[in-house]
Image: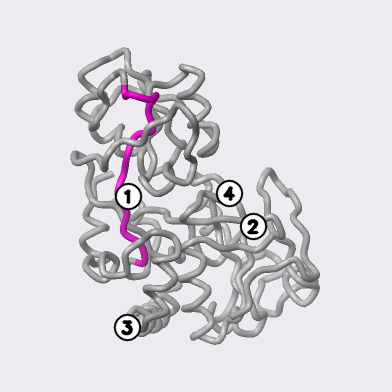
Amino acid sequence: MRRTGVSRRQLFRTSGVAALAIPAAGFLTGCSFTDPGTGKPTGATLDRLKQQGYARIAIANEPPYTQIKPDGTVTGAEPDVVAAVLERMGVPEIEGVVTPYESMIPGLNANRWDIIAAGLFMKQSRCSQVAYSQPQLVSTESFAVPAGNPKSLTDIASVKSDPAVRVAVLPGGFEDGALKNAGVPPAQTVNVPDGRSGIEAVKAGRADAFFLPTLSLNSLEAEGIDITPPIQDVQQTGSGAGFRQQDRDLVTAYDAELEALKGTPEFDRILDEWGFSGDAARGVTREELCSVEG
């Protein structure tokens, strides 16, 4: 399997979004599957991806879900699964584009990337805008709090019970939506741009907790910070690859190869490497995760 690497590529910044440059054979020189007037893809998306030899994926650079290594390689649990499935489909490479969570769906629908592969958790509002694959990852949620958890924050209810509590969130992330759906006032949330900034907000006293998936918080371990046990009053979270609604044929083909991959040791090996459970991903359906409110 070929990953996005440093060969003929460099990290660059465009329109406020960090991206990995596409090889000269890619879109920088034009593509017969793109309408020159609108920039929108034409023809079957899978045929286009096979011809160009790569798929552009939106990621957030939030380990263990997504990560860019120092050499520019795109990895993480979701991109690794997506890369394995796409290879089975005849698309040997992935190209990562780093973007905020709130920009992922608009960017997908504006054809800036082909797939969202960022651990963008399924919920009702997103499932109405994105054609998700079957689940690839299932996760839990926790708070990062000052050592000793002085505010005794163990769940969303404990946040709501104290109007003075401030919780850091990534805007547009699942956790931001979970707090809003639970009726936590906007004044109790502190927006931060990334995981490290959330930890720093807690350490500096700007927030009493940082709400994020348990595994993400564990990867951000810092002195003076504790990670709470998984929060119980938030619905089960999980993600799949996200596609444009009009790419239903691509989703069907992707699901078939994903199902085949789930039946191999490779699927468990990929998820085990990042701390996820293959059995957990097999034990839930797209319909169940898309029923999550928000």
Q: Which mark is residue 125?
A: 1
Pick whichever of labels 2 and 3 is earlier in the sequence: 2
Nearest to viewer (mark 1 / mark 3)? 3
Q: Residue at x 63, y 78 (%)?
A: 2
| Residue, disc 3 | 263
* Local crowd size for mark 2, using a 10 Å CA cut-off: few (<14), some (14–19), many (≥20): few
Circle 4: residue type = Thr
| Residue, disc 4 | 99
* Local crowd size for mark 4, using a 10 Å CA cut-off: few (<14), some (14–19), many (≥20): some
Q: Residue 41: image x %, image y %?
A: 60, 71
For mark 1, give the secondary structure: helix
In the image shown, does 249 or 172 lie closer to the viewer?
Answer: 172
- Gap in angstroms between the C-alphas marked 2 and 3: 29 Å
Q: Give the extent of the magenta segment.
A: 136-149
- Gap in angstroms between the C-alphas marked 1 and 2: 32 Å
Q: Which mark is residue 69?
A: 2
- The quarter of the picture where residue 96 lies is bottom right
Asked if marks 1 and 4 touch (Cβ < 8 Å), the reply is: no
